[in-house]
Amino acid sequence: MQQAQHLFIDQTGYQWAGKRVAVAGLARSGLAAARLLLLAGALPMLWDQKHRDQLPGQEIDDLVRDGCQLLAGASPEQAIDGADALIVSPGIPQTAPIFSLASRVGLPIMGELEFASRFALGPIYAVTGTNGKTTTVALLGEIFRQAGQLVHVCGNNGYPLSAAVAQAKAEDIFVVEVSSFQLETIDTFRPRIAAVLNITPDHLNRHGDLAHYAALKRSIFGRQSPQDVALLNADDPLVAAMQSGLNSRVAFFSRRAEGAEGAFAHQGMLMLRWAGTEQAICTQEEIGIPGAHNLENALAAAAMAGIAGVPPAVIRYALRSFAGVEHRMEFVRELDGIRYINDSKGTNPDATIKAVEAMRAPTILLAGGVDKQTPFAQLAHAIRRNSQIKHVILYGQTAEAIEQALRKTGFDAVRRAADLQGALAQGTALAQAGYTILLSPACASFDQFKDYEERGRYFKQMVSDLISGGEQHDGA
């Protein structure tokens, strides 16, 4: 609260000072929005369906001490009573009663991403898509850092844009991971460069169908002007088709096509073509993170950085040194010749397909979780095609659906476990020296965990507790 108030001015002209603002959802993004509201001189009203004893402690206490009103456990009607505006966390769907109640009384409604972006003085570089977002923004942030920029890598990766804006200086830049949930509630959000990496079925339990989901992803370009850039995956037909009707300048990245402006692979080299020049960045072998999907992520990050003016030598250095992100194909340990890989970030079938296709050693796959109404047929075929997948151990709500899909392909090496701990125990008992045990759930984590990060940390702790011979320490 020591920062100068004049820094926290809504760039659209909306006056927040003195406004009573309901903040719905008190997880990371809601709490960060509340802090930014205080910095802008507003009077936040903090609401969540959960009661106070079910919510995180110290941060809420600090916000209340600094002037927020707490309405934990109150009704939606009470939450918006007397409010001038409503800010919603991305986890709250538009079908929630608080949306219709706020609309009925004419309250301005915006998501945390939209709200925070209005206070960002520096440029925003945004990345969305079904898979690869976290890796791409982390890599792009590293490129900018190597170029000497002050950069905040934030958004859907667990560090809300509101928190980044509250800490930023005027010259800082923002690299923002954007989810489809966040895109439901944008209006003025305008990235200088925005990328859509890929589109495969995900979150259909919330978005209804693939067409609506893809339209949400495309909306990231909706406020761009001809001075801004839309970066599209030329190898993904749904993404490439988004170029039609855009106001922004369009660029592409591709592992296969070489014709357009952007970044592409050519004879083992990553190339950048922009503003009438073509430059080599590095060889594919120099990229520090393995896999065809990570080549795409590297191309997207390199294109965004190159278009933003980062020299190829800096991009090359960052691509060589970047080691990846936590919970995405993360090596945990090797014990008794068995390698353990944490891919808890694999929260949909397409992400797990990429993990499965990357396996080059005998592998036991641990998968399952919450049903997002995504089909598992393509995942089952990918598992069947890779002869290195020796067993699949399933747990959670989706175990039956995944098993049925696998057996339809003729893959019968399927087992069930009560939970992730049981799946790991079975996998460790089945594995031999030279095997890999891969956690790549293909599903959300909310059956057992609050998010994929908690699931990944739990898996890593269990693996760390394993001792030679497959036994566990007491209390594991």
Image (cartoon, helix red, strand yellow):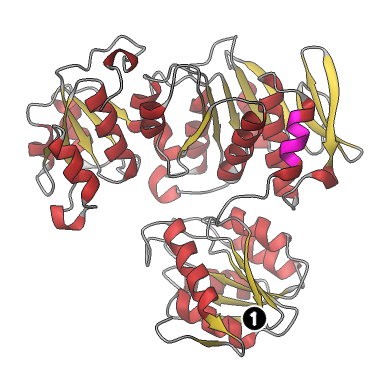
Residue range of the region highlighted in magenta in the rendering: 314-319
Query: Which residue corresponds to the image point at 53% horizontal and 78% vertical from the top-left?
Result: 424
Q: In the rendered image, which quarter is residue 22 located in? A: top left
Where, quadrant-wise, is the N terminus in this rendering? top left
Name the spot of residue 464 as percent of width and height, x first: 54, 74
Most prominent secondary structure in the magenta stretch?
helix
In the rendered image of this protein, does residue 404 appear above or below residue 324?
Answer: below
Q: In the rendered image, which quarter is residue 263 located in? A: top right
Name the spot of residue 266 as percent of width and height, x first: 88, 35
In the rendered image of this protein, does residue 420 appear above or below residue 117?
Answer: below
Q: Is residue 51 visible?
A: no
Residue that mark 1 sits on: 412
Q: Amino acid at mark 1?
A: Asp
Query: Which residue corresponds to the image point at 49% horizontal and 26% vertical from the top-left?
Result: 219
Name the spot of residue 21 as percent of width and height, x first: 18, 27
Name the spot of residue 4 as percent of width and height, x first: 29, 17
Q: Is 194 left or right of 445, judged from the image as shown?
A: right
Is 77 part of what is drawn in magenta? no
Q: Secondary structure at mark 1?
A: loop
Query: Which residue corresponds to the image point at 66% horizontal and 59% vertical from the top-left?
Result: 355
